[in-house]
Structures are given as C-alpha cells and as structure tokens.
Image: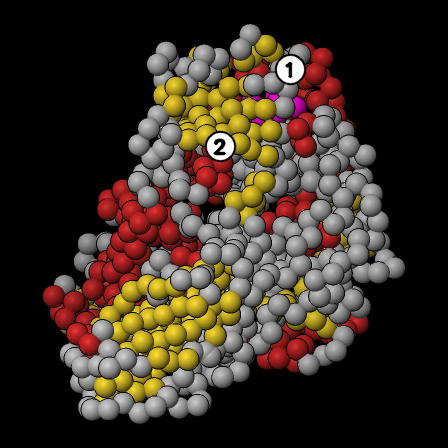
C-alpha cells in the first residue's frame, strides 16, 4: 500500500536548527549609487583595529560604520535587538583541530603518529556542545572540510551520513587504549606513559574568540582519555609561527585549534579539499618545506591532482573522486573538523550598497566597493586587527591572513571571481571564450604559440604537433584601457611578466631551490599549460590540458595571469629575492635563510624594492626575454624607464610598494597604530562605477512541507514535496536508523517539472525494517544558490496499517529557518583565488 505525504518545510537557505535572519539588508534589494563617477561609492575607507568586545559600542558611538570580524555570540544577540545596527549573518568561517602526525624522537611516543588514536578523537569531540552551547546555536557541526552550507555537501551527503560519527567518549577511550597498548604505552594511575615517562601533549589554543572555550573543552576530553596536556594560550602571530613555520618532528605542538575564513561560495570545490587533506598542496604538516618531516598520503595526492587537473570524464567521476578524498581524510583524521561558524557582522543601519555573498555575507569582494553612508564621503571600518606580526603583503607568497586580504580586495581587480550566490566562476575584469575538445579529444596548438624557456629566460615556440585539451581566449581590454595606481598604462607586458614569473619560480633550478614549497605546489598546474599566444593588443589565448563539464571552470583554471601588480614591481621583488637574497617570498624560506618575509607595506622592505628599481634604472636594463613574443617586443627602454620612475615616485610618496589596479589605492598603512587608509582611484579610464558591483541579497531556496507519519512494515511509502526557487533543482535523501547509525537506503528524488518532487520507499526496503523510529533526511539544492536546504522527517515504522499523517510537521521547527551566506577568495598571486580558505580568519 502506498502513502502520499504532503511535505511542508519553509527554509530560506540551509541550516538545521539555526533561527536567525541571515539575509537582513539595510536597504533591501534596492540600491541608489551616490554618484556615477569612475571608481567606488565612497571616496575613502579607513580601517582600524577595534577589539571585538568594543565593536557594538563603537558602532553605537558612530566611530565605525561596519565591523568585519564576527561578534561573539552574546554580543551578536544584543546587536540583533539594537535598532541602530543591522546584523548580517554568514557561514564565513570554520574551525578545526589540527593534529601533529609526525613520529616522536627515539624513546618517546607521539600518540597522533598512530592513525587509530587520531581517529578516536573524532568521537571525543562534542560537536553539538560546541555548536549549541559555546556558539549558542550560531554554528553547525562539521565532520569534514565540506559542511552543510557548501554546494558539495550534496556530493558527500550519503558518505557523511554513513560515517555516523557522534560524541562517544567511551568508544573513543576504547580505541585509544587499544592503539596505545599496541604501541607499547601503559596506563599508570590514569595517565599514559611510554618507557616509564609520562606522554605530554603540547596543545596550542587560540584566545581571541570562542576557540579558547573550544580548546578547553577538548583539553578536558583529552585528559579524560589519559593524556597529560601542556596548554599554551596564544593569539594569532605566535600560534601561526609555532605551528605552520616549524618542523612537525620538533614536537613544538601536538594539537592546534585552527580557524579558517573563505572569500566566496564555490560551486565545484577543488581547492579546499586539496588544501585541507592532500599533502602536495603544502597545507598539511610538513608544509612541503625542504628539510621538514612531511605527512604523506599518496592516494590523497593522486586523487587531489586528478580533481585539480580535471582528470575525469564527467560529473559522476568528479564526484566519486571528491567523495573518496573526503572519506580518506576523515579516516586519516590529521585535521578534525568541528563546526561551521555563522559569523555575525554588524553595520550601521544606514549603510548602503551591501551585497551578501552566500558564504561570506558582506565580507566579500563586492560590498566595500559599493558601501557608503548617505551624506558622507568616508567609510569607517573596524576589524579585530589591521596588521599582525604575520601579516604579509606580497602577491607571490603572502596574503595568508584575512586581515590583509580584507583590505587587498578593495585595491585589486582580479580577472575572474565567483558569483556571490551560485559560486560559479564569472568574469570580473577580464572576459573569456572557452573552446574544448575534452574530455577525450585534443585541439591542435597553432603556430605562434609559445612556452616559457627557464634555461634561455625567454618565451620559445612550442614544438610542432603540440596538442591541448582546451583553449581559453582572455580579453583584457578593461585592464588595458586603464592604468595602474601609479599612473602607468596596464599593458600586455604586465600579463607576460606574471606568466613568466610563475614558470621561472618553479622551473628555474636555482629559484626553485630557494622557494621550494612554492615551486612544488605550482608544478601540477604548470605541467598542464601547453602554451600561450598573443592574438592582438587585448587578447591572450591560453592552451591547457584541462577539462571540466562546467566550462567556466576551464576559464578559471586557465587564468594564468592575476594582474596583481605592475611588471616592474614584480621584477624588482624577484631581484631582491633571487639575486640579492635579501628577502623571501614565503614564510618558510624566510625562516630557512634568515631573511625577511617580503612585505610591501613595510618601509624596510619597500626600500629593498626601491634599491632594485634604482639599480635597473641606473643600468638601463629590463628582462627583455620576457617581453619578446612572436617577433614583437612589448617593452622598450623608454617604457621601462617610465615605469621605474613612476614606481620610485610612488614609493617615495607613500613609503610602500603596493601598487595595483582596483577602485581604491592604498595610501596609508600604520601597523603600530593598527590603521590603514585607502582612497578612491578616480582615473577617468577606470572601467567601473558604483552600481556595477552590486548584487544585493541572494535568492531563497525553499523545501516545502514534510509531515510526521507512520509507515507499515512491508508497505511502500511515497513522499511528495516541493522545492521552490531559481535554477535547476534536485533533492537527495538518506534513510537512517538513529539507534544504530546505519544507512538503510538513499537515492535521488524524482521530479517531472523541477518543482514537485517525490521519494519512494519500496516495500522491499520497508519489509526489512523493525518497528521503531527512523530518520529520513532530505537535502534540496539549486544550481543558482550554492547553499543547500536540509530537513529531517521522523518516520514511525509500525506493524500493520499505518496511521494517517499528523497535522504538525516533525522537523526541527515548523517555523521558517533561513540560512546564511557564502564568499570569494583573493586573486592575483600564486597562492590566492576565490576558493582558497585563508589561514586563521579569527
């Protein structure tokens, strides 16, 4: 017998059990630009450090107009009730527990070098307590790098439900005891010892936010498991230095409470899963730094490179790779995910021009370009920090913290970004046209196409008969019709230098030995580039061995030039790093060679760049091999001299070497005062004006109506429901026994019209069920909104005739439960881009 269930759940975006209004907008979806001049809405933005506990008072006093760091949960609740403040909510950050898997020195034992001990901690952390008690419901538990606010949550949905990892300290203790005894450790007086000495774990806990409470909770659980804990409570800079700049085998740390922030939504993730799981990308212990012990997992590296390089035949193969990587990462448990934190970002209620990216909310590339207060030309923005001892402004191996990135995004225009709602790659300042023969075919690479020759220091013709999977033609006319901030025209020479620089760093033997980590992590991309061809004054053709079923991702992959800074500044930095050896691009190389990590906002480092520019100017030289392509030279001696003069004048005026091309220009940066100021770039050739970046609030996806019901054993059951919202939609379901955690059935809901959906449980499935309560999880999603919507239906399985459906829904709440927003990454360097997570957002 069949039962039709009318499903009723109103959800505007995603979340199980979080009751807030995430898309509240001070101006709704209407926006009136204050003027139509080139550049941003405000004439200047002043960034200042404001302690998170004082942010609300600073807003009320009018000292700041917007705060870019998430309020603590109690302060957020107070702000939500303040009529002078608009509170934006977005799942812009995540927290994780990083474990050190390196083997201990002889005679000692590192428990986390044992996979079973690491995995046991999955059951020792109380994610529900973290989300509901520490974050007061403004967080969602996470089992993997992908969480319930991510589009790829639907890719891993069944896998994550099958894991059934819950808080079970007794089971964790059993796993730990078995593994520790097997390694030769003994439990003496409730404490683990090895060769007669207590096993002491160094736990670094961040103090700026709720992670202190999270760390204390985990510390107590570790002590209950028998470990002796030495706790270090540290803020951003010393914590980062201790963990990410040290050899794991030195055992300066065993555990660390990580925090991550994202710049955009991501439709089809490739960067986060690699960064958070696969060693090759340099974000797993060892950091791919020469001389350090390295965490290794060949299977994760192979799968990660397949995903990164587009080595799949269709979406199903891509999803299978993603699922396997996620499963292995959970099993390895080097990084244990705890929660997605719903950030609470307060602003003055008269702040105009806010775009709410579905991951980052207003903390995206879009908002500060459009934001203004009526009647004022200056915007005052607060953050926890403006600068930290680890904040580094360089587009090659810097911009690793959100504090620098938050400002950089106002200064630089990337070629591509992510749609703030769907997470798809979209043109930002460059446009593109994609041609592909993939996944199985090849395109001929035409004459006139060149590749970088790291031995000859020049662009050389590709070999005859070269072929590639795809080509992308990029049109940079919106750059080339305008200027850099120092007044020089942006040209194809800037594109060519940034391309040559990427290859040179990875392929030149001497340079790659200096910047090992950057070289190693760049190679998997560079190996797929089959050549470039300058078509005319504005267009560049790029050939790559890469394919994706979503062609915008081919363009994103082939976008080889970030156009972050003028070629002469990049060339001067190269001279400082590789010729003078007075600085380094990356933190690990700086530490290894005892030189500064080059930071273009600091006076001393800017002087190094100035000295290199003066040397090139005085000797009347420039890297001519970079600029000679197809018999044409894109830089003359006169051009180079004009560039040097302009860059030197900029450094002399501002004491910094940060020169870019976006709507604002950096004019003041004062780390001791925790202050920075950007001014509008109003050059008449600048191609954008207020209104061009405004997107407003995202559309809602609604999963409508699920009622509690009973199902007869051996009877078929059918569930009807609706998914309302834009785009092509779909739904997945998982039937689980809550008593055992076993997944009993899963699949995809059927639809005839992209709105009305149905889930059918056949009698062959229900016939194998015992009487009792079962959970049916339903996940709806749309290709135009990257956050899915999830609901749980309670099914009472009975013997005999089932009861009629009850009138009250059995989900978490019958009240609409809106969800949060998403965010893009910074583009323009080797290590940045919309889908990158930034270290230590908090």
Q: Viewer-proximal residue, 545 or 206?
A: 545
Looking at the rendered structure, the number of numbered marks drawn on it comes to 2
> Around disc 1, counting alpha carbons within 10 Å, would you say few (fewer than 14), some (14 to 19), or many (20 or more)?
some
Left or right relative to 400: residue 794:
left
Q: Viewer-proximal residue, 701 or 566?
A: 701
Quarter of the figure with residue 506: top left
Region of the chain picked out in magenta, as a range = 491-497
Mark number displayed over residue 635: 1
Quarter of the figure with residue 792: bottom left
What residue appears at the point 73 percent right and 41 percent down from the top-left corner? 688
> What percent of the width, then of the height, locates residue 426?
56, 43
Q: Viewer-proximal residue, 721 or 411?
A: 721
What residue appears at the point 63 percent right and 37 percent down from the top-left corner? 429
Left or right relative to 373: residue 139:
left
> What percent of the width, then of the height, locates residue 720?
39, 74
Q: Quadrant of the N terminus?
A: bottom left
- In the displayed structure, 93 sits above or below 249; it is below
> What percent of the width, then of the height, locates residue 142?
39, 67
What residue appears at the point 53 percent right and 27 percent down from the top-left corner? 473
């Amino acid at each position: 017998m069949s039962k039709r269930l009318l499903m009723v759940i109103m959800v505007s975006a995603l979340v199980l059990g979080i009751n807030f209004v995430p898309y509240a907008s001070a101006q709704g979806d209407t926006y009136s630009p204050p003027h139509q001049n080139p550049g941003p809405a405000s004439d200047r933005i002043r960034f200042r450090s404001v302690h998170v506990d004082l942010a609300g008072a600073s807003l009320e006093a009018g000292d700041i107009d917007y705060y870019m760091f998430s309020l603590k949960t109690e302060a957020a609740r107070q702000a939500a009730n303040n009529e002078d403040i608009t509170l934006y909510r977005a799942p812009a950050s995540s927290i994780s527990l990083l474990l050190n898997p390196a083997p201990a020195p002889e005679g000692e034992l590192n428990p986390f070098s044992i996979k079973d001990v690491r995995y046991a901690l999955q059951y020792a952390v109380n994610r529900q307590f973290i989300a509901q008690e520490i974050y007061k419901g403004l967080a969602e538990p996470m089992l993997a790098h992908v969480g319930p606010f991510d589009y790829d949550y639907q890719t891993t949905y069944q896998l994550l439900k099958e894991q059934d990892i819950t808080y079970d300290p007794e089971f964790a203790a059993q796993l730990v005891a078995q593994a520790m005894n097997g390694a030769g450790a003994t439990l003496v007086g409730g404490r683990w010892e090895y060769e007669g000495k207590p096993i002491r774990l160094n736990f670094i806990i961040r103090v700026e936010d709720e992670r202190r409470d999270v760390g204390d909770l985990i510390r107590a659980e570790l002590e209950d498991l028998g470990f002796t804990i030495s706790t270090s409570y540290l803020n951003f800079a010393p914590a980062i230095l201790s963990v990410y700049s040290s050899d794991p085998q030195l055992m300066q740390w065993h555990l660390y409470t990580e925090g991550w922030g994202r710049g955009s939504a991501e439709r089809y993730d490739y960067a986060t899963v690699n960064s958070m799981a696969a060693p090759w990308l340099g974000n797993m212990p060892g950091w791919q730094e020469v001389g350090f012990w390295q965490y290794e997992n060949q299977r994760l590296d192979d799968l990660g490179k397949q995903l990164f390089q587009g080595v799949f035949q269709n979406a199903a193969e891509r999803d299978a790779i993603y699922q396997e990587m996620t499963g292995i990462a959970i099993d390895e448990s080097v990084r244990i995910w705890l929660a997605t934190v719903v950030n609470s970002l307060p602003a003055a209620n008269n702040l105009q021009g806010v775009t709410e990216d579905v991951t980052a909310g207003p903390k995206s590339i879009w908002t500060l370009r459009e934001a203004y207060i009526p009647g004022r030309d200056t915007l005052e923005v607060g953050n926890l920090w403006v600068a930290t001892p680890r904040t580094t402004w360089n587009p090659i191996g810097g911009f690793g913290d959100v504090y620098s990135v938050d400002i950089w995004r106002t200064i630089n225009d990337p070629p591509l970004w992510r749609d703030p709602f769907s997470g798809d790659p979209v043109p930002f300042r460059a446009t593109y046209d994609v041609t592909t023969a993939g996944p199985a075919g090849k395109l001929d690479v035409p004459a006139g196409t060149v590749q970088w020759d790291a031995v000859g220091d020049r662009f050389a013709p590709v070999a005859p008969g070269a072929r590639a999977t795809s080509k992308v033609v990029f049109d940079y006319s919106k750059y080339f019709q305008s200027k850099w901030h120092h007044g020089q025209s942006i040209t194809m020479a800037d594109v060519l230098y940034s391309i040559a620089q990427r290859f040179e760093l990875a392929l030149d033997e001497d340079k790659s030995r200096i910047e090992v980590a950057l070289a190693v992590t760049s190679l998997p991309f560079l190996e797929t580039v089959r050549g470039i061809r300058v078509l005319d004054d504005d267009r560049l053709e790029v050939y790559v061995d890469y394919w994706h079923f979503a062609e915008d991702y081919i363009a994103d992959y082939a976008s080889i030039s970030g156009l972050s800074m003028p070629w002469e500044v990049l060339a001067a930095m190269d001279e400082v790093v590789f010729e003078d050896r007075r600085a380094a691009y990356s933190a690990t190389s700086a530490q290894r060679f005892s030189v500064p990590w080059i930071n273009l906002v600091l006076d001393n480092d800017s002087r190094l760049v100035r000295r290199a520019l003066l040397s090139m100017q005085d000797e009347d030289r420039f890297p001519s091999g970079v600029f000679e392509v197809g018999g044409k030279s894109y830089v003359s001696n006169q051009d180079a001299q004009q560039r040097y003069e302009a860059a030197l004048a900029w450094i002399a005026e501002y004491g910094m070497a940060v020169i870019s091309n976006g709507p604002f220009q950096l004019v003041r940066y004062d780390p001791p005062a925790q202050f920075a100021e950007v001014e509008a770039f109003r050059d008449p050739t600048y191609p954008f004006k207020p209104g061009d970046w405004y997107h407003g609030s995202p559309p809602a996806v609604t999963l409508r109506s699920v009622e509690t019901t009973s199902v007869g054993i051996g009877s078929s059951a059918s569930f009807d429901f609706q998914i309302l919202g834009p785009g092509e939609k779909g739904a997945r379901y998982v039937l689980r026994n809550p008593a055992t955690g076993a997944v009993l059935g899963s699949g995809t809901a059927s639809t005839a019209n992209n709105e009305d959906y149905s889930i059918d449980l056949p009698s062959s499935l229900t016939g194998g069920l015992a009487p009792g309560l079962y959970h049916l999880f339903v996940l709806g999603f749309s290709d135009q909104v990257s956050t899915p919507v999830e609901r749980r239906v309670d099914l009472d399985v009975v013997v005999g005739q089932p009861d009629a459906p009850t009138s009250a829904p059995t989900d978490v709440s019958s009240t609409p439960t809106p969800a949060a927003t998403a965010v893009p990454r910074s583009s323009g360097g080797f290590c940045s881009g919309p889908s990158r997570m930034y270290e230590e957002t908090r």
